[in-house]
Image (spheres, rainbow, N blue to C red):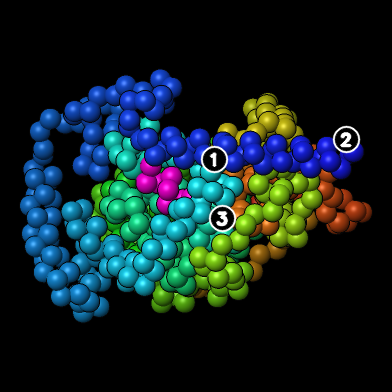
């Protein structure tokens, strides 16, 4: 047998193995809850249904109260009254824009979300115009989808604390699996990205299978929402929104912005899931649904405004935290368990922030580029190439991946430069021999140079690019208000004399690896191409040209007092006074 014939036989065997695996996975979902469908015990853990399940189907670690307090009784009464108004409004759709705006911001009653979301996303029109398309896409997915394995793994993880998705191969799990596979064929340019499972999962809590498919398509392809740019290779919309988010913070919350820079808290660390799945699993589910209501009405500008609202409402606590991990844990974990404000107050704050951002002409990010929207014809089947069918991983890097890496490094380098412009190593506690600072410095340096994977994944928190500094000086706090979020026009900034740093630490290992998987349709392999590039950069296989042919990130040990213990004479402490968020208008 010749070498060429042997290679052909090997490739044929690999393709057959992939086809058999896809067929086996689809059969399991087709069997669903049939007793003959054997499920491992760990996939269906035991749980108590009664007393620990909320109205949305999510389970809690402890029993819920057996009786309702007076506030909950009043909320239930109000929601029942809103049910009647919404049913009447839906019967005469579309309503007057002002009436719709007012009622959506008050909150769509949970029982009305199914018909309301369908109308906001024009689901019935899409289904009527594309009759039979979903069934055809699903049949093609059963024969040709190269994303099946990854989708199966993600379905098994999505919303496992919700009754609808708790049981393996339940009705909703099967629907989620079908929707994602069918859409990977329908939008072959996008394929599948992990964040899509959460978006489709939320839709399926309120819609039927085909309805959720077309609702997902509207969210991805409609320019009002434009989620295609979030999930496509290179994540161009994410980059654009993160830059705009930073621009807002630098103008209206400068003290918090500099606090984040000093502690290496890049927006990529906490805003990935805010933007990818519209705050699901980052704030209480009831609040995330309220944000979704407004998002479906007003579009993607709501996402940036809600991100600013969260940071503003919790600014005091964030300024007290002096550690990157503590800040990230607060934003990613603690706010999900206890947001600190009821849903109505949070939405009122969001509405005011949106208005003030519009007044300051900061409500809309720069216009989207062409690569944020589909360029291929939707629904046109494109059979994957041999490498994609086999699932073989390529070692080359696309220009898009290299550009993403360059952008990430540039962001971190700019942050380092901003820190260096105000502080120097000579005035740090390390320079004066503070034992606590030296111990902290050694620990963070060890973390920075460690090849271990970060405790936060790319999917949850962004690909981690960290440099480290120490600053133990406390920040002044001030009262925040939900009900009186009034902005001032930005005052003229005081000029600051920047002193050049006399010492800097150079760290080539500050780009940590992330765990987000990204599968692309068509002409890309099935793993996250960004992960490949990040791995290569971390191991220094991919060298980006910079000074002396080596790209380095400057990390400076920061402090705010000089060697004599006196405070430097600069205007750093005046940053908060110049915030566009007025201090006298933010009393509780």
Q: Position of residue 144 (x, y in %)?
A: 57, 50
Are the residues at dot 2 and dot 3 in contact (C-beta closer than 8 Å)? no
Residue 179 lies in the magenta stretch? yes
- State which region is magenta: 174-182
Mark number, residue 22? 1
Question: In the rendered image, which residue does mark 3 sit on?
Answer: 191
Residue placed at 48% from the left, 67% from the top? 221
Front one among 497 and 73: 73
x and y percent of residue 86 in the render?
A: 15, 65
Report the quarter where the C terminus lies. bottom left
Relative to 248, is 356 on the left or the right? left
Residue 358: give x, y in percent of width and height.
41, 75
- The circle drawn on residue 405 is none
Q: Which residue is at the front of the view, 259 or 68? A: 68
Compared to residue 342, the image places residue 40 above or below, namely above
Q: Which mark is residue 1?
A: 2
Q: Is residue 267 visible?
A: no
Q: Nearer the viewer, mark 2 or mark 1?
A: 2
Q: Nearer the viewer, mark 1 or mark 3?
A: 1
Q: Is residue 384 magenta?
A: no
Residue 83 shows in this picture: yes
In three-dimensional space, the C-alpha distance between marks 2 and 3, rounded to whole angstroms, equals 38 Å
First-in-chain label (2 vs 1): 2
Badge 3 element: loop
Q: Residue at x 30, y 27 (%)?
A: 61
């Amino acid at each position: 047998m010749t070498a060429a014939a042997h290679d052909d036989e090997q490739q044929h065997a690999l393709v057959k193995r992939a086809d058999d695996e896809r067929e086996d996975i689809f059969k399991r979902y087709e069997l669903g809850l049939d007793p003959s469908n054997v499920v491992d015990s760990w996939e269906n853990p035991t749980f108590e249904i009664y007393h620990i399940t909320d109205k949305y189907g999510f389970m809690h670690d402890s029993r819920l109260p057996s009786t309702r307090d007076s506030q909950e009784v009043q909320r239930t009464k109000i929601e029942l009254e809103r049910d009647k108004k919404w049913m009447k409004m839906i019967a005469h759709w579309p309503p007057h824009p002002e009436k719709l705006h007012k009622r959506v911001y008050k909150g769509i009653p949970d029982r009305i979300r199914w018909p309301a979301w369908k109308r906001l996303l024009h689901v019935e029109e899409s289904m009527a115009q594309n009759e039979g398309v979903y069934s055809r896409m699903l049949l093609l997915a059963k024969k040709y989808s190269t994303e099946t394995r990854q989708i199966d793994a993600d379905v098994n993880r999505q919303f496992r604390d919700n009754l609808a998705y708790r049981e393996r191969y339940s009705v909703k799990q099967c629907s989620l699996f079908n929707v994602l596979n069918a859409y990977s064929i329908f939008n072959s340019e996008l394929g599948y990205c992990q964040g899509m499972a959460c978006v489709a999962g939320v839709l399926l809590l309120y819609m039927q299978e085909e309805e959720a498919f077309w609702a997902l398509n509207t969210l991805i392809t409609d320019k009002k929402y434009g989620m295609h740019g979030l999930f496509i290779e290179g994540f161009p919309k994410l980059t654009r929104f993160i830059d705009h988010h930073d621009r807002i913070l630098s103008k209206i919350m400068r003290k918090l912005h500099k606090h984040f820079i000093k502690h290496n808290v890049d927006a990529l660390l906490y805003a990935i899931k805010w933007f990818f799945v519209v705050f699901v699993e980052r704030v209480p589910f009831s609040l995330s649904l309220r944000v979704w209501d407004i998002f479906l009405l007003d579009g993607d500008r709501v996402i940036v405004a809600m991100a600013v609202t969260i940071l503003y409402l919790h600014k005091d606590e964030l300024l007290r935290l002096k550690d990157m991990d503590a800040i990230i844990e607060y934003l990613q974990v603690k706010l999900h368990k206890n947001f600190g404000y009821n849903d109505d107050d949070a939405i009122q704050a969001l509405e005011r922030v949106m208005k003030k951002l519009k007044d300051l002409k900061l409500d809309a990010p720069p216009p989207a580029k062409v690569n944020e929207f589909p360029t291929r014809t939707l629904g046109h089947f494109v059979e994957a190439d041999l490498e994609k069918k086999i699932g073989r991983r390529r070692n080359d890097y696309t220009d898009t991946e290299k550009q993403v890496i360059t952008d990430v490094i540039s962001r971190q380098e700019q942050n380092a430069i901003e820190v260096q412009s105000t502080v120097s190593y000579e005035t740090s506690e390390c320079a004066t021999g503070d034992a606590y600072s030296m111990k902290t410095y050694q620990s963070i340096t060890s973390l920075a140079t460690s090849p271990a994977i970060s405790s936060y994944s790319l999917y949850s928190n962004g690909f981690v690019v960290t440099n480290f500094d120490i600053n133990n000086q406390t920040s002044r706090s001030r009262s925040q208000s939900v009900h009186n979020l009034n902005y001032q026009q930005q005052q003229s900034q005081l000029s600051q004399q920047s002193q050049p740093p006399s010492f800097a630490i150079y760290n080539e290992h500050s780009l940590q690896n992330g765990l987000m998987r990204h599968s692309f349709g068509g002409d890309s392999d099935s793993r996250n191409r960004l992960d490949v590039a990040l791995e290569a950069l971390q191991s220094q296989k991919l060298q980006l040209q910079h000074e002396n042919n080596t790209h380095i990130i400057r990390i400076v040990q920061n402090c705010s007092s000089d060697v004599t213990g006196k405070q430097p004479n600069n205007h750093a402490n005046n940053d908060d006074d110049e915030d566009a968020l007025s201090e006298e208008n933010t009393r509780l």
